[in-house]
Image: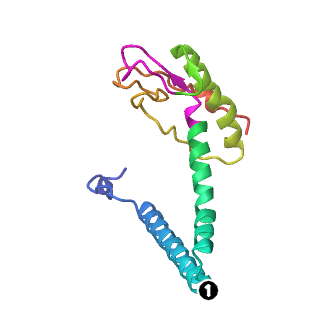
């Protein structure tokens, strides 16, 4: 790093991030306008509440199905109750590991097997979306009180794939 670079501060928002966020907003606005136009078109052409209802159901159905099944898939994996570090004794999860070791083995296997295959296909990033347990849901990486990490850090060997 040169001495001229040391005095410069990093920008608060990177140019690429700003362009990405701007393009997302433009895209969402465009989608909203199209959806609104479709509602008006159906209303003006048919004057029928039945057709308006059917088009609304058809436009929302994919989101509802993905939300429901996506949540079920996410919650059925990687749940582990740690006593004295949880919100309550009730446990919510579809696949529950009884020990930290079992959970850690499953988590390591996820990265080694499933994520490894996706990296070969071009995956560049992945995110585990529940950092800590939330009340009765025990599928976080940390316990509810955030005092116990349930999984060990990923070993460097996991990221050595035959690409």
Query: Residue reaching furthest right?
Result: 162
Closest to the observer, 6 or 11: 11
Q: Residue 146: horizontal and vertical position, in percent? A: 35, 25
Q: Is residue 101 above or below residue 18?
A: above
Residue closest to the eye, 80 or 65? 65
Residue 14 versus residue 79 in the image, above or below: below
The number of numbered discs placed on residues in the rendered structure image is 1
Determine whether the residue tagged by mark 1 lies in a helix, strand or loop: helix
Q: Is residue 19 magenta?
A: no
**How packed is label 1: few (under 14 Cα within 10 Å), some, or many (20 or more)?**
few
Q: Residue at x 68, y 35 (%)?
A: 114
Main secondary structure of the magenta stretch: loop
Vertical order, 22 against 116 (above or below) = below
Residue receiving disc 1? 45
Q: Position of residue 30 (x, y in %)?
A: 51, 74
Q: Is residue 84 magenta?
A: yes
Residue drawn at x 73%, y 40% is 163
Instruction: Please provide the residue range marked out in magenta.
Output: 74-92
Q: What is the quadrant of residue 14 in the picture? A: bottom left
Q: Position of residue 71 (x, y in %)?
A: 56, 41
Looking at the image, the residue that sits furthest to the bottom is 44
Q: Quadrant of residue 118?
A: top right
């Amino acid at each position: 790093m040169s001495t001229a670079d040391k005095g410069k501060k990093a920008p608060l928002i990177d140019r690429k991030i700003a362009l990405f966020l701007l393009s997302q907003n433009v895209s969402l606005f465009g989608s909203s306008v199209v959806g609104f136009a479709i509602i008006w078109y159906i209303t003006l052409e048919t004057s029928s509440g039945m057709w308006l209802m059917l088009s609304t159901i058809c436009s929302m159905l994919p989101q509802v199905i993905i939300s429901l099944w996506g949540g079920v898939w996410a919650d059925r994996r990687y749940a582990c109750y740690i006593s004295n570090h949880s919100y309550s004794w009730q446990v919510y999860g579809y696949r529950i590991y009884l020990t930290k070791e079992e959970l850690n083995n499953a988590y390591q296997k996820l990265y080694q097997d499933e994520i490894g295959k996706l990296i070969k296909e071009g995956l560049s990033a992945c995110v585990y979306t529940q950092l800590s347990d939330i009340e009765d849901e025990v599928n976080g990486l940390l316990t509810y009180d955030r005092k116990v990490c349930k999984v060990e850090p990923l070993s460097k060997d996991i990221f050595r794939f035959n690409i």
